[in-house]
Image (cartoon, grey):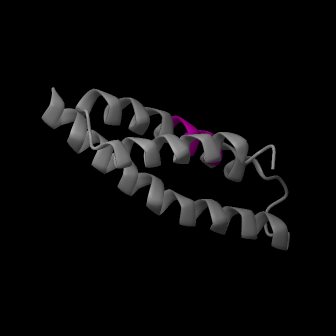
Amino acid sequence: MRSFSSKAHRFLASLIGLTVFVQMFLAGLWHSGSVATPEAHVFTGLGLLLASLLALIFSLVARNDGKVTRATALLFILILLQPIL
Protein backbone atom coordinates (compact mmCIF):
# COMPACT_ATOMS: atom_id res chain seq x y z
CA MET A 1 0.00 0.00 0.00
CA ARG A 2 2.84 2.36 0.83
CA SER A 3 4.41 1.98 -2.62
CA PHE A 4 1.11 2.69 -4.39
CA SER A 5 0.47 5.72 -2.18
CA SER A 6 3.93 7.08 -2.84
CA LYS A 7 3.51 6.68 -6.61
CA ALA A 8 0.04 8.21 -6.48
CA HIS A 9 1.40 11.17 -4.51
CA ARG A 10 4.16 11.72 -7.07
CA PHE A 11 1.69 11.48 -9.95
CA LEU A 12 -0.73 13.94 -8.33
CA ALA A 13 2.08 16.37 -7.52
CA SER A 14 3.18 16.32 -11.18
CA LEU A 15 -0.42 16.70 -12.35
CA ILE A 16 -0.95 19.69 -10.03
CA GLY A 17 2.25 21.31 -11.29
CA LEU A 18 1.12 21.02 -14.91
CA THR A 19 -2.46 22.04 -14.19
CA VAL A 20 -1.33 25.31 -12.61
CA PHE A 21 -0.13 26.44 -16.05
CA VAL A 22 -3.47 25.46 -17.59
CA GLN A 23 -5.24 27.37 -14.81
CA MET A 24 -3.26 30.54 -15.56
CA PHE A 25 -3.91 30.16 -19.30
CA LEU A 26 -7.65 29.86 -18.67
CA ALA A 27 -7.58 32.94 -16.43
CA GLY A 28 -5.80 34.84 -19.19
CA LEU A 29 -8.39 33.80 -21.75
CA TRP A 30 -11.19 35.02 -19.51
CA HIS A 31 -9.38 38.26 -18.65
CA SER A 32 -8.70 39.05 -22.31
CA GLY A 33 -12.34 38.57 -23.20
CA SER A 34 -11.81 35.52 -25.39
CA VAL A 35 -14.35 33.61 -23.30
CA ALA A 36 -17.47 35.06 -21.69
CA THR A 37 -17.43 33.23 -18.36
CA PRO A 38 -14.69 31.98 -16.01
CA GLU A 39 -16.32 28.55 -15.65
CA ALA A 40 -13.37 26.58 -17.07
CA HIS A 41 -10.99 28.44 -14.75
CA VAL A 42 -13.24 27.82 -11.74
CA PHE A 43 -13.73 24.12 -12.43
CA THR A 44 -10.01 23.65 -13.01
CA GLY A 45 -9.43 25.29 -9.63
CA LEU A 46 -11.86 22.89 -8.00
CA GLY A 47 -10.00 20.02 -9.64
CA LEU A 48 -6.74 21.38 -8.24
CA LEU A 49 -8.29 21.52 -4.78
CA LEU A 50 -9.45 17.91 -5.03
CA ALA A 51 -6.09 16.75 -6.41
CA SER A 52 -4.19 18.50 -3.62
CA LEU A 53 -6.44 16.93 -0.98
CA LEU A 54 -5.87 13.49 -2.50
CA ALA A 55 -2.12 14.17 -2.65
CA LEU A 56 -2.15 15.06 1.05
CA ILE A 57 -4.05 11.88 1.91
CA PHE A 58 -1.67 9.74 -0.16
CA SER A 59 1.33 11.47 1.43
CA LEU A 60 0.00 10.66 4.90
CA VAL A 61 -0.76 7.04 3.96
CA ALA A 62 2.67 6.59 2.36
CA ARG A 63 4.30 8.04 5.48
CA ASN A 64 6.51 10.27 3.38
CA ASP A 65 9.25 12.41 4.87
CA GLY A 66 7.91 15.15 7.14
CA LYS A 67 9.07 17.87 4.74
CA VAL A 68 7.12 16.35 1.87
CA THR A 69 3.95 15.98 3.92
CA ARG A 70 4.23 19.53 5.30
CA ALA A 71 4.78 20.92 1.80
CA THR A 72 1.76 19.00 0.52
CA ALA A 73 -0.35 20.27 3.42
CA LEU A 74 0.80 23.84 2.71
CA LEU A 75 -0.11 23.41 -0.96
CA PHE A 76 -3.59 22.22 0.00
CA ILE A 77 -4.08 25.16 2.39
CA LEU A 78 -2.90 27.69 -0.20
CA ILE A 79 -5.18 26.27 -2.90
CA LEU A 80 -8.03 26.29 -0.38
CA LEU A 81 -7.36 29.93 0.54
CA GLN A 82 -6.80 31.20 -3.01
CA PRO A 83 -10.46 32.04 -3.77
CA ILE A 84 -10.60 34.09 -0.56
CA LEU A 85 -7.43 36.01 -1.36
Residue sitting nearer the eye, 46 or 71: 71
Query: Where is residue 4 drawn, in percent x and y?
Result: 18, 34
Q: Residue at x 39, y 29 (%)?
A: 57
Residue 43, quarter of the rendered image: top right
Q: Residue furthest front?
A: 66
Give the quadrant of the N terminus. top left
Q: Please provide percent x and percent y for residue 49.
A: 57, 39
Q: Nearer the viewer, residue 38 or 11?
A: 11
Tell me if residue 15 comes above or below residue 47 in the rendering: below
Q: Is residue 48 magenta?
A: yes
Is 81 included in the stretch rendered in magenta? no
Number of marks present in the image shown = 0
Q: Is residue 72 left or right of residue 79?
A: left
Q: Position of residue 80 (x, y in %)?
A: 66, 39
The image position of residue 59, as x and y in percent, is 33, 36
Q: Is residue 47 left or right of residue 83?
A: left
Q: Residue at x 73, y 63 (%)?
A: 27
Magenta segment, principal secondary structure?
helix
Residue extending farthest to the bottom is 32
Residue at 51% from the left image edge and 57% from the top image edge? 19
Q: In the depicted view, which residue is nearer to us: 46 or 62? A: 62
Report the magenta residues as a range.
45-50
Residue 47: which quarter of the image? Answer: top right
